[in-house]
Image: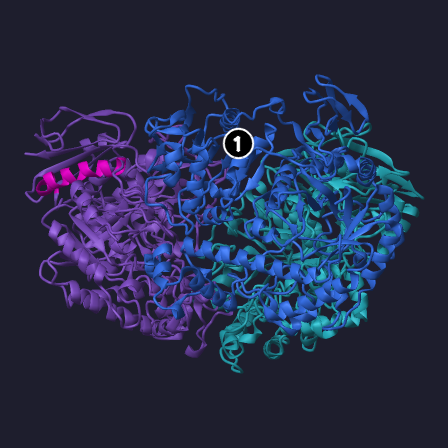
Chain colours: A purple, B blue, C cyan
């Protein structure tokens, strides 16, 4: 990627009247230099089985090329045509809820050969047609691909074979999954029941893992097809998305992003987040850190919000702040969903950069300033490199297992991840994400491990060893509790990591009116109460940082720290307030020797740093608030790029409400 | 209708022991002069396929006639017999939820020929038998007829033909409904999918309109059958009901009442409403105004509550107040659901005038006074005529479209209708309801238009023209936003009415801590905050009445008024408190020259006026509260009918708690 | 039963590694003298159709016997093997929700002959094999058996035959069930519809009664099978459970416990209850009183909680207090669900006496003291006899009828039962449960009748007669309202009991801001407000204890008492606060001459008394609170058994927090 890309999703097919020339003129005015097309409109390109019409693709490619706007072409396979479903209703996924029915996107069985046959043909036709067009810089396979809960008979059959391949014998499965319980034991392969009704979380979690594998397989198959046509300089990407809670919240349950990203040239993501008075930048940072970590490099924000929902229409300044926030996390491209606001159907109120009237509006006008700055600063800001010393360890397996065994109040894995991640964000500690299988833990000085509930022994032993050799780990409650088959460990909890943590427990309770107490830490007045979960920890060698203030559980520790070998392991046995979690993490960051001047600042002032392609340090400063702020610049002499003013160490930096400044050192 | 009717629904079939003579004696004591029978008991009248037994009908007709009580006979088609469903399970409607199952009423496919065959036969048998009986004054076809969400394969097939008939080509449909989106495009008629799973609101709304058409067709077919037997002086009516939110709340989503009412001789309705401390009279007024507007004449209240639910058992005085409230809106009949409280099944706790013990009780005793007064005052009060100068424009199409595109917090069309209607009610501004297709807008001085979200261009142009020629319109937010296919207009919003309103907007947001400010209006202290929805209005020629008090949206207008030609158009861009809505409407009423002495009174004092069949003015005064009240009489000299006392202008009128007075001028 | 049993459920089949010897050693340390095995693991014992493997049963029996631990063997029929469902999917119950699917336990059609064939074979194989083993002291048939909502075509067919057998003619059915309503009338047996969709509560309640009959039949069939093998001295029991609201709340809706208990030798139950700060002992008392009443004798607590859920992990002292609470209600055995915490599947977080690590823990350590005391005190405490003078009359029919006709706010029958029972518990009034069909009412001085909503005339007449002859009754609202077919009585309410109660009513309302007033009773300041339900009572001969404080309902009585013959009937027409209910019950207890020194104590001090097998009085004292307490001992001289100290009348008894003392008189 040689430059910053500023883009939109564009659908000539959706326009209520001829717009192409005028749209391109408006894009040019806004500095748009890339559009993303084609992934939603199979039924337009193949109006009948085997009849193809790429008129709108051709004309958009030609017009964009003439205007100097690059194009990313998506394979249109995530929404199936009406004729395909009429001819072969079984392309729709059968799920635990029963037969599928036509209407929405993302409703097909991604293992169905009829679907795959037709998908392959439209991919070959489309990509074969466009690959040599000079406007095309890359491809997106499908969109926000998942397994759509496909669980019909054919999928069950594949799952049985997968189980036999993986576990060898039913005896092995019965034992590891505890199937004697409630007479679920399977004694002949033919008896293997459909797992859609299972009440065995181990089996259910394995099926979810198998389903995630289907996504990996499907995407790799698409990439291989597209690669047959890909020209030098072009890339293939995928639009990964996150757990959705009305916005991009956490680790994606239905896809193993790390595994799925492997065949791609570059990672793409969509990131949506609360806005207006609720804009904090946290999701931009979270999604960016994840995207950057998947292939350990820069990434594309293929979709993010322009106006979007009524509750997200940005305040003046926010669109601009958001765009630079993406760059500050390592994005090389920021593209909006979508250019115009669609006049019919499901996303009528998911507004684009333009309103339904196609006229310039305050949001579009702000985009014009962004486009101009992206163009001017491209060489200085593109390809930002991070050398983070902190990692957060996440796991699809832990996530799924905790869906089966939820915390009280319905809290799940991502609640724990975000509880800790958000505090790192607020103290300006930048981090990468890693999986438990990541080998080179010693790249990091501090590893934060939220609720690593289901995991293989070897990875826990690896973490113990990491600590012994000088690393620092912060574990939350529930870590280490079960093995990779979601079987609870029969050793004392927290199992294998007890050794490094220097603690043990066998009881855990739901806190009721339980507060915390500490001899060494200031817990504040608000921050003491705990909720959801508490483990009754007994230290063996660990130091007690915090214990419970309760008539019956007062003898137990809540948070401990253990020196083990050259490093330390901190264990948080309960879900504290964010403030207390922040205090514990702060101690760990200091212990790891990572506390610097950026950490003296805190949300709503966010600082993000990295190195550009000239290996010069870049520092982004953001003010995520409605109030102007002034901070002291603490890094090497340089230029503030947006104002083109020189900055020296100890100079004040004045940040507008929802403001951004960018200092390039040297 | 030559006299006031006071009635009950009566089911000889449900009686636990022989009651007919005693029931009639008690009815006579209470002044009951009409009963409604037969619409629920097909399985009694046709116990087996083709075997008929009308014993209970015959004996009730004879006994009522002997007692001088008139009878309205219902066609018993809204609840199908067990044998019919056993023989032909496919008479049950297939809906989006799947196959139907026997048990409740109103579960059949009203297009199914097996159902229609049997329905026709029982109608002909029953109506042919009773039509010449001297007790019979009229007929009710079916009951609270709707389409019951029928959406099976046969209905889908009809819908495809309807679409082809209406739109001609698939190209036209694809474009108007935006079907390219998410690959929903249909390129061959055979590919037309069932719409039960559609995510396209345009298509979904059209299907709902088609379903409402099925109701029109079904009712017209029943009326034509009954008309074959109808004798001179008899009428055919239908029991229309309203959007149900535990009571009669708003415009009926599943039936186009205006179209459905066409074949009938007179409109009937049921109206149920909160009672006890929650009795306000609003639903009686709303339902009455709607019923009166459907055929622009008097109407029958075929069902309303006597004791009903435990939370509705009336306080002393309320039953009486309610009865006269119906008359005050133009009803010629008030009938209770139902005479006795049913001893088994679904409506055991929907109590009638009598409790389960058939003994006189406080509610029945109060009914006796009502029956006596109805009889005494019949000639003076029957056939009340209204010459309202205010109309509220309502639309099934707007309602359905807003079901697909709900306001935040799940608010829908009727919330907006009631937000404005209720304020008119509280300020004693009487109104009619009209549809957008209503031609003679100049009958009215003021037209209030809540959320006319989906509507044809021509109707909006008609409204512009109405203003230009001197009319006054108050629009709420969302009006004019989409066309009749629920496609958002691609001109600046609010689209066509921008011209008369003198405003434009392209952004809208969900308010968070947004208050209002006004230079000219007193907004009170409570009334300022807004919720749910706000459009960021920019006036072109309009005067700003109210604007937003907010750091980022403060430059935009909230409520505007524009002089256009000879009239004014007021536009309310946000959902204000009821009080602020009332203030805006008050200004519009004054502007239209309609503010009079009745408007100086306000809820809980409600005044309703009209002209009786001698063309003399009648004024009803109600006190909807637990506190006695005194008001000054401001109209021409006359008689208070319930006390038979003379009243002069400026005399005080003393109203009891939950009291009513009726002054006949002249 | 010659001694107290202290036990656990034990599953060798679920162990993650070989544990038997070590488990038994730990059991012996804890005083465990009985284990319950085998009811959940059919698929282990019959791994393929007709192939049997009882290895784990054999080895557990042998090892337990060697250790002197007795065994209760369960028939493993409540969870079906995978192969059975694969071979015959129709063994799964078809319910109102549709076809069943494999996964959970308790999902089969208990009338299906394929299921019954296989169930019989595994029962005969298992019980035949173990019956002569010296470790075996008894059997449990199935587990927590219910009808699982089975309602498929075969069940509907049986129901039609049941209806014909019971009611003779359709005319009779149509009349009693009110089927003319909404055309539900059935005129030919072939037309009888499936009742899964019925809206007729009478029919629905009869079907529920029929379904409960299926449970009786199924259990009797199992008992007969087991009896063929049962050896002298062995018993057959069933594990009955209660309405589940996250814990054992009230009368079981799906089983008629009294009828179902008949074929068994002794009653077994499971009782689960809130713990920690929410432990009150109420559910232990409620479940115990019910279990003791079913066959009017001692009972087994086959399952209760050890650690269980995170919110139930007992405070120190609570496990011990709970164990003795069971004994105080008449239990001869207390057994935990379960020995160890299961490492996989549905109940991973339903922890046993041991945590997943199998190590001693605080809860296990406390169990060791219980086992020791049970052993030491067995002869003095076993076979506790109660001679209660108070009974609470409960009814499955009333319960089901009120499911169809719920109280406002979704309150149902058991809410009313517990509203009154809990107050008896809190004032230390011990009671039995009886059904309406119970003949010897004169065994009791006071009968409390919560919401006897559906009941035959004869039972109400029996209650009238009981009062006339000197008995005392307290009725709640809704009692007597409908007959056994859930047809509302057409006499004045409360129907037949009006005579003894000396009241009548025909109106009832939902209270809104209604308070109570009384000339004779102190209603406190908190206790006055009522909710949910109020009947507007008019006394004929009754004395008004409490009336309504309300502008419109102030003339009506709320609570009345009537002297009728030699006794009194109190009628509570509304749902008062618990405190007011307690005051009314207190008056009734005093009236009945049952107020004694135990009643001067009150919750959190609970006293339970009885006679042991030497006919000596035993008094249990419990302190259900976190605060130490001292009470005065008011009974005859004796020994406090846990401390082995002598106690005289008027001595103080000092109770620890969550403490227990046991005084044996004489």
* Residue occupying image coordinates x 89% and y 46%: C499
Pick out the residue farthest to the top: B650
Residue A253's x, y, as percent? 35, 55
For label 1, the SS is loop
Give residue B188's position: percent from left, percent from top: 36, 68
Does C211 appear above or below A666? below
Name the residue nearer the viewer: C491 or B166. B166
What chain is tagged by disc 1?
B
- Queried whether the magenta region covers residue B221, the answer comes back as no
* Residue A250 visible at all: yes
A605 horizontally vs B355: left or right? left
User: Exactly how many numbered labels are in the figure?
Assistant: 1
Q: Choose top left, top right, bottom left or bottom right for residue C216.
A: bottom right
| B333 relative to A483 in the view: left or right | right
* Residue at x-position 17% and y-position 52%: A296
Q: Is residue A371 magenta?
A: yes
Q: Which residues are magenta?
A: A362-381
**Dominant secondary structure, magenta:** helix
Label 1 crowd bin: few (<14), some (14–19), many (20+), radius 10 Å: many
Q: Is residue C15 visible?
A: no
Q: What residue is disc 1 on?
A: B445
Q: How far from the left and from the top, in percent, is residue C305? A: 57, 53
Picture quarter with the C terminus of chain A = top left
- Could you tell me which residue is drawn at 52 percent across and 80 percent down? C52
- Residue B452, percent from left and from top: 46, 42
Name the foreground residue: A653 vs A468.
A653
Q: Residue furthest right?
A: C565
Horizontal relation, residue A316 to residue B614: left or right:
left
């Amino acid at each position: 990627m040689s430059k910053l890309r500023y883009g939109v999703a564009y659908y000539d097919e959706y326009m209520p009247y001829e717009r192409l020339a005028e749209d391109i003129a408006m894009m040019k005015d806004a500095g748009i230099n890339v559009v993303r097309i084609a992934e939603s409109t199979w039924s337009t390109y193949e109006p009948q089985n085997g009849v193809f019409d790429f008129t709108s693709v051709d004309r958009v490619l030609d017009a964009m090329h003439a205007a100097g706007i690059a194009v990313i072409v998506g394979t249109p396979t995530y929404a199936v045509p009406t004729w395909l479903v009429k001819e072969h209703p079984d392309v729709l996924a059968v799920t635990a809820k029963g037969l599928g029915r036509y209407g929405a996107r993302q409703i097909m069985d991604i293992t169905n050969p009829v679907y795959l046959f037709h998908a392959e043909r439209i991919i070959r036709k489309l990509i074969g047609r466009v690959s040599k067009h000079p406007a095309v810089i890359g491809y997106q396979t499908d969109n926000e691909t998942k397994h759509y809960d496909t669980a019909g008979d054919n999928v069950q059959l594949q799952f049985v074979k997968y189980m036999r391949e993986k576990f060898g014998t039913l005896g092995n499965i019965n034992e590891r999954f505890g199937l004697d319980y409630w007479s679920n034991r399977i004694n002949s392969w033919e008896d293997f029941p459909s797992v859609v009704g299972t009440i065995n979380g181990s089996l259910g979690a394995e099926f979810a893992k198998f389903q995630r594998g289907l996504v990996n397989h499907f995407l790799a198959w698409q990439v291989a097809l597209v690669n047959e046509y890909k020209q030098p300089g072009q890339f293939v990407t995928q639009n990964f998305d996150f757990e959705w809670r009305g916005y991009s919240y956490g680790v994606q349950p239905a896809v193993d992003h790390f595994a799925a990203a492997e065949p791609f040239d570059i990672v793409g993501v969509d990131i949506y987040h609360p806005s207006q008075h609720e804009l904090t930048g946290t999701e931009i940072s979270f999604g960016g850190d994840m995207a950057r970590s998947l292939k350990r490099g820069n990434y594309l924000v293929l979709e993010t919000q322009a106006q979007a929902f009524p509750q997200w229409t940005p305040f003046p300044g926010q669109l601009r702040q958001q765009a630079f926030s993406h760059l500050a996390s390592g994005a090389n491209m920021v593209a909006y969903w979508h250019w115009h606001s669609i006049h019919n159907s499901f996303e009528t109120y998911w507004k684009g950069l333009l309103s339904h009237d196609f006229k310039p509006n305050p949001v579009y006008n702000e985009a014009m300033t962004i486009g101009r700055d992206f163009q001017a600063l491209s060489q200085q800001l593109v390809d930002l490199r991070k050398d983070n010393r902190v990692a957060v360890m996440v796991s699809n397996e832990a996530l799924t297992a905790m869906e089966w065994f939820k915390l009280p109040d319905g809290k799940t894995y991502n609640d724990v991840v975000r509880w800790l991640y958000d505090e790192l964000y607020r103290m300006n500690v930048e981090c990468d994400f890693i999986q438990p299988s990541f080998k080179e833990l010693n790249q990091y000085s501090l590893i934060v491990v939220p609720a690593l509930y289901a995991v293989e022994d070897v990875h826990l032993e690896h973490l113990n060893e990491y600590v012994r050799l000088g690393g620092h780990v912060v574990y939350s409650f529930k870590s280490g509790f079960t093995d990779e088959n979601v079987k609870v460990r029969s050793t004392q909890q927290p199992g294998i990591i007890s050794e490094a943590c220097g603690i043990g427990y066998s009881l855990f309770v739901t806190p009721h009116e339980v507060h915390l107490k500490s001899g060494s830490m200031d817990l504040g007045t608000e921050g003491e109460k705990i909720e959801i979960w508490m483990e009754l920890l007994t230290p063996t060698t660990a130091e007690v940082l915090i214990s419970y203030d309760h008539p019956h559980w007062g003898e137990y520790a809540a948070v401990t720290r253990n020196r083990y070998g050259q490093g330390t392991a901190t264990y948080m046995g309960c879900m504290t307030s964010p403030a207390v979690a922040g205090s514990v993490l702060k101690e760990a960051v200091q212990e790891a020797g990572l506390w610097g001047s950026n950490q003296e600042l805190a949300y709503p002032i966010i600082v993000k740093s990295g190195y550009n392609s000239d290996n010069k340090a870049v520092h982004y400063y953001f003010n995520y608030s409605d109030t102007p702020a002034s901070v002291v610049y603490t890094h090497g002499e340089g230029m503030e790029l947006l104002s083109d003013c020189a900055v020296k160490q100890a100079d004040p930096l004045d940040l507008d409400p929802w403001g951004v400044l960018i200092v390039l050192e040297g």
